[in-house]
Amino acid sequence: MQYIPPNYATLFVATCNLLNLAAPNRVYYENQDAYTEREYERKIDWIGERFHALNADVLAVQEVWDESALKACIARSGLRYDFVSVPGAENTPPHTGAQGTPRVGIATRLKVDELRSFVDFPPGFGVEVPGLGPHTRFERPPLLATVRMKHGQQVHVLTVHLKSKRPKFLQDAQGNPLEDRDDRKVGVMASLRSLLMRGAEAAALRCIVIDLLQDTNVPLVVMGDFNDNPHSVTTQLVAATSEVAYDKAARDVALFNAYEMQGESALKKDVAYSHIHQGFPDVLDQIFVSEEFVATSRHSLGDVRRVDYFNDHLHEGRDRSRSDHGFVRALLRLRTA
């Protein structure tokens, strides 16, 4: 009997933290100057060039203040994305962009069957943060897009941006400090607040992942800025990859680091980092996939062919017209038959 190799459809996905992408002449953070028209043009030119190089079917973006600015970047890229959305950062009246914190968004050339933004944690998953009270909502709501490939296969794409490690100091409604930031013990408590908030967000995100994966075979891609590395406690709270080693049933709801799932022919380079902090490279921007993309799984529908890190600009010096994060792109495949 003749072996007929399977046909595959390819799916390029990429995650991009755009470092405060905002419209010109509008204040986004009280302590930062608005972009001038010239700075804005430089920023959308630079991002447009990067989008063109990525040429992804699905772009997951973070740190967007104005949806209009993202659309301007896409226009500069020369690529066509029929669907662009950044919930909470819309600029159609009466909306005036994101307020307080930037948002996550998506751009895709695929058909979108459903779009859903998650604001509140599931019941019972809030935590008490010292000095701040209950933390029961995502600061930057994760965005779920259910896209449909040309051969009809649905894929869930979840864009995330978890709380940063930056210390969370107490301040009043006007942004004035309420505690001594030079006191090192106060600094410890401020860092603990951030960790508690990121941990709670990770746990709430895990619940969303379980709901999407349990007893289904719709592939899931989770990507974005996790603000911690792939093997950290908070990232593993979301992925639960390690549970697979001792519980085979856990595969159904586990996530797998796309970089570690690459095919044998992929070049696994030592330049796999997406952020540099005080001279040390780290991976904060990540792409995770469900077992449908794990070639060795009996529930496999495809595989991860390659993961690339676009990070050369991290060595070009700090400039807010560029991003302080590298962009990560994965080439995924799904069988068409």
Image: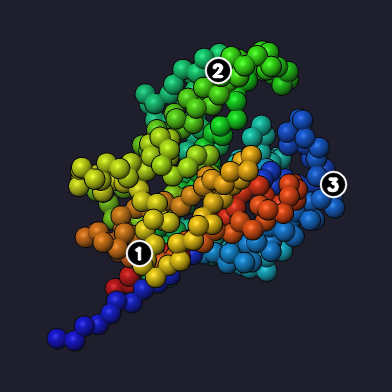
Residue type highlighted by circle 1: Asp
Which of the two discs, 3 and 1, labels the residue nearer the N terminus? 3
> Is 308 drawn above or below residue 194 in the view shown?
below
Q: Position of residue 280 (x, y in %)?
A: 58, 43
Instruction: Give me the residue at 33% from left, 72% from top.
Output: 336
Residue that label 3 marks: 36
Please, what secondary structure does the residue beneath circle 1 have?
strand
Element assignment for label 3? loop
Which of the two discs, 2 and 1, sits closer to the camera? 2
Name which residue type carries label 3: Thr
Q: Which residue is mark 2?
A: 189
Residue 93 lies, with reference to residue 47, above or below; the image says above
| Rendered residue at 33%/41% (across/down) | 240
For this view, does 69 lie left or right of residue 310? Answer: right
How crowded is the residue under tag 2: few (<14 C-alpha within 10 Å), some, or many (20+)? some
Q: With respect to residue 221, does 166 lie above or below?
A: above
Q: Which residue is mark 1?
A: 303
Dot 2 or dot 1, earlier in sequence: 2
- Residue shown at 69%/16% (left/top)? 182
Q: Earlier in the sequence, mark 2 or mark 3?
A: 3
State whether residue 260 is above or below residue 187.
Answer: below
Residue 271, quarter of the rendered image: bottom right
Residue displayed at 28% across by 79% down: 5
Q: Kindly report which numbered mark, 3 or 1, lies closer to the viewer in this rendering.
A: 1
Label 2 vs label 1: CA separation? 43 Å
Q: Assign the N terminus to one quadrant of the image.
A: bottom left
Is any part of residue 281 visible from this angle? Answer: yes
- Residue 101 is marked as none
- Left-right relation of 313 to 304: right
